[in-house]
Amino acid sequence: MVAANSSAPQHAGTAPSRISVFEMALAALQTNALVAAVELDLFTAIGRGDSDVQFLAKSTGNSSRGLRIVLDLLARIGFLDKNRGLYTLSPLASQFLSTDSPDYIGGMVLAMQSQRQREEGHLLAQTVRTGKPPEADPGDLEQFFAQLVDPLFKVSAVASDVAARAICGHSGRRGLRVLDIGAGSGVWSIAIARRDSHSRVTVVDSPVVIEKVTRRFTAREGVAEQYDYLPGNFREVPFEESAYDVAVLGHICHGEGQQRSRELFGRIHRALKPGGQLLIAEIVPDDERSNALFPLLFAVNMLASTPDGDTFTLSEYREWLQAAGFGEVITMEAPAPSPLIFARKP
């Protein structure tokens, strides 16, 4: 899986990694998590022995989802120790962040933040309590996506070509039928379409995304004639059964959450032909959620911005995919935040 990363920039003599840039871009979430934990007095509760997430949720009145995501990040950056899912205070937190300590400085942590930082930390604390973020403004989400789509295409293009080589080379034939769910720019299926000029790609996404984003990118990349569209919410649009050779989920599961992802896997399994395969590109933490920093930061980002989103481990993906009827589940290294996941329908 993904190796542990530092949020410090790469030094000369080491291979540059975009992950370091991503981690720095999300670095404020480390501060927000600390502020939220101080506001909720989590360090005191953990220091008194409430080290299991479920028990801590009951004793403090916070959501287990919010606690687990924030505590994993705090453990990764040194404020907690984590062992087999149990959290204990690091010496740093024990001395300075538990109100049971005479050296407690949590009030200073809150006072040293700017007004905006205090507000962000407070909002995260509220989300940890409820497990759900504040209601988002649809206009803000549309603007965010508009800013994200072009750089995201560039970031994913090389990895998508690695995936396309594996898919087209493994099939040994041309004319693949591809289902791209929540395609956005279509970066993952465009790579397949370029390698297989006889392929047909069906995109399932909202009408606005299809018209403003997907059609623009498929035209720019010269594959527009290979694309068909099913406009609508992919949670509701029916997929043709036993019709596709390949299905693509490019960074969809982290926003959908566990339950919806599992439901989606079942629908995709029914949509694939026997021998068909599912490609999942995702941000995947190690199984203990303790080493790689970026997936833990991104999980906090999902906590703060989605009702159910999270980052999920390879073990979780394997379990859910096999429960949906998939057989072989493998990973492939690629220039991406995490290895690509491939699942095959028997």
Image (spheres, rainbow, N blue to C red):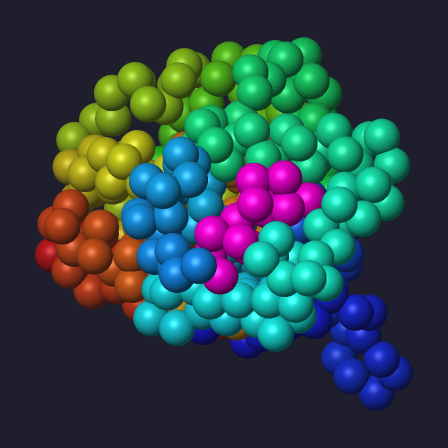
**Residue 7 in the image: above or below residue 205:** below
Residue at the outermost bottom position: 13
What residue is at 78 percent from the left and 83 percent from the top? Answer: 14
What residue is at 22 percent from the left and 50 percent from the top? Answer: 320
Q: Quadrant of residue 309?
A: top left
Residue 274: in sight, yes or no? no
What residue is at 46 percent from the left and 23 percent from the top? Answer: 205
**Residue 126 in the image: above or below residue 6:** above
Which residue is more in the foreground, 323 or 218? 323
Which residue is more in the foreground, 249 or 28? 28
Q: Which residues are magenta?
A: 35-47
Q: Is residue 68 left or right of residue 344?
A: right
Give the percent coordinates (x, y) of residue 11.
85, 80
- In the rendered image, residue 24 lying in the magenta stretch gets the answer no
Give the percent coordinates (x, y) of residue 174.
35, 52
Tally the marks: 0
What residue is at 72 percent from the left and 21 percent from the top? Answer: 143
Q: Is residue 154 left or right of residue 176?
A: right
Figure quadrant of the C terminus? bottom left
Residue 150: in sight, yes or no? yes
**Residue 316 in the image: above or below residue 194:** below
Figure quadrant of the N terminus? bottom left
Q: Is residue 318 left or right of residue 151?
A: left
- In the rendered image, residue 43 lying in the magenta stretch gets the answer yes
Give the percent coordinates (x, y) of residue 215.
60, 24
Q: Main secondary structure of the magenta part?
A: helix
